[in-house]
Image (cartoon, rainbow, N blue to C red):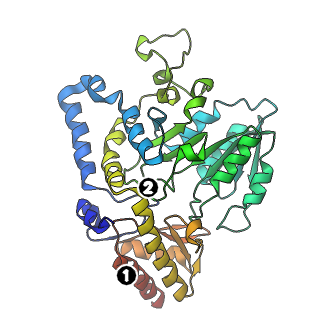
Amino acid sequence: MTNLLSYRQQFDSLKNCHYLIANSLGAMPNSAKDWSDKYLNLWQHRGVRAWDDEWWPMSREVGNKIGRLINAPNDSISMQPNVTSAQATILSCFDFASKRNKVVMVEQEFPSLLYLYERWLEGNGKLEIIKCPTNMTAPIDKLLTAIDNSTALVSISQVLFRSSYIVNAQAIIEKAHQVGAKVMLDVFQSIGVLPIDVKKLNVDFAVGGCLKWLCGGPGACFLYVRPDLNDSLKPRFTGWLAHESPFDFDNTGMKYTSGSYRFLNGTPVVPALYTCQGGLDIVSEIGVEQIRQRSLEMTSRLIEKALENNWQVYTPQKTYERAGTVSIGFPNALAISKELLKRNFLIDYRPHAGIRVSPHFYNTDEEIDELIQEIQRINRK
C-alpha cells in the first residue's frame, strides 16, 4: 500500500490547520495553483485564440478524466457548473404530462435538489418524497415500493450528506429498470472516497463534482449519461454548445449534437476546468480503493472516540454502510463548531447531524485525536 501521508507535501493548505472537512470542500493541492497559472497565461498570451488552442474541447477531456475514476466510457461525461443545473438538464428531457409522470426521492436529499424537483413538477407531474424515520438512513423497502409503473425517474444520492449512509443504489436501479423507470444517481458525496463503477451499476445518469473528495474546488461538476440513451434524449434546458454546428450560429432551430456535448448549454466555466485537474490527478494516482481503506480506518477511529465520550453518532457504525464522513452530535454543537473553526479545526455543522468530520488520505491519526481532545477542552469551559 502506498504511503498516503507522503502526499501531504503536495498540500500547503494543510499547514497551520487541521483540515477535516473533505466532504464539503477538499483541501487545495499545490498543483491547483499551477493549473490556474496555466489558464491565466494562456488567456494573457493567446487571448481569444485560447478557445481553439485548449478551451473548447476541455469539457470532454476533463469529463474523460473523471470517467476513468468511475468506469465511464469516453465522451459520456459533460462538465457542468453545479449538480443542480446538471439534474435540471436531465429533467428537461422528460415529458411529465404523460402517464409516466412520477419522480421518487427521499427527504434526506440535499435541499437544493428537493427545491428543484418541487418547482419543476408543480402542476405537471408528481413528486413522491419518502419519509426517513431517522436522519441516518433511507428506508429501502419503502423506496422500492414507491417505484412503480407511473415512475419516470428516481433521483437518489449514493451517500446521504448528513449521515454518510451508503444507499443501496444497485437495488434501486434494478427495481426502476424492471418497471421502465430511470435513475439519477448523485455521487457527489462518494466519488473519490468510495469505488464507483457506473457500467456495473447500469445507472442511467450520474452527477457529481470535484469540489469535495476530488480536491478540485468549485465550478467543476459533471453529468454522466449512459451512452445507449444519448441520442434519444432531447434536453429542453440547452444552449449553443449542444448544437451539432455551434459555430454556424444557426437561428433556424435546434439540431442536437451527439456525445457528451449534447448535454451542455452555454459557455463552460473554463477556469474551473483547469483548477480541478490537480486533485483529479492525485486521486487517480493513489486509486480510490486505497483511499477507501484508509478512510474506513480513520472514520472507525472517530466513531470509537466519540462513543467513548458518550456523544451521539449519526453515521452508521457498520463499515459497509458508511462512506467518508462521521457526524457527531452533542449539546451546543453549533456553538462548538464555530469555536473549532476559530481554533483552525476545519469541520462543519449541519442541523440534525451535529458536526461533520471528513478526514481524507492526507490526514493523520494524530489530527483525529487532537480534534477529539479540542472538543473535550471546549466542553469543559
Amino acid at the residue labelled 1: Glu
| Of pointers 2 and 1, the one earlier in the residue sequence | 2
Q: Quadrant of the C terminus?
A: bottom left
| Residue 261, position as x, y percentages in the image | 47, 27
Residue at the spot x=77%, y=47% of the render? Answer: 147
Give the quarter of the image for residue 352.
bottom right
Badge 2: residue crowd in 10 Å (few <14, some 14–19, many ≥20): many
Q: Is residue 278 left or right of residue 331?
A: left
Q: Name the mark on residue 192.
A: 2
Residue at the spot x=41%, y=85% of the render? Answer: 373
Badge 1: residue crowd in 10 Å (few <14, some 14–19, many ≥20): few
Q: Is residue 22 above or below residue 16?
A: above
Disc 2 on helix, strand or loop? loop
2 vs 1, front mark: 2
Amino acid at the residue labelled 2: Gly
Q: Label 2 vs label 1: CA separation?
A: 25 Å
Q: Which residue is mark 1?
A: 370
Q: Is residue 195 above or below residue 349?
A: above
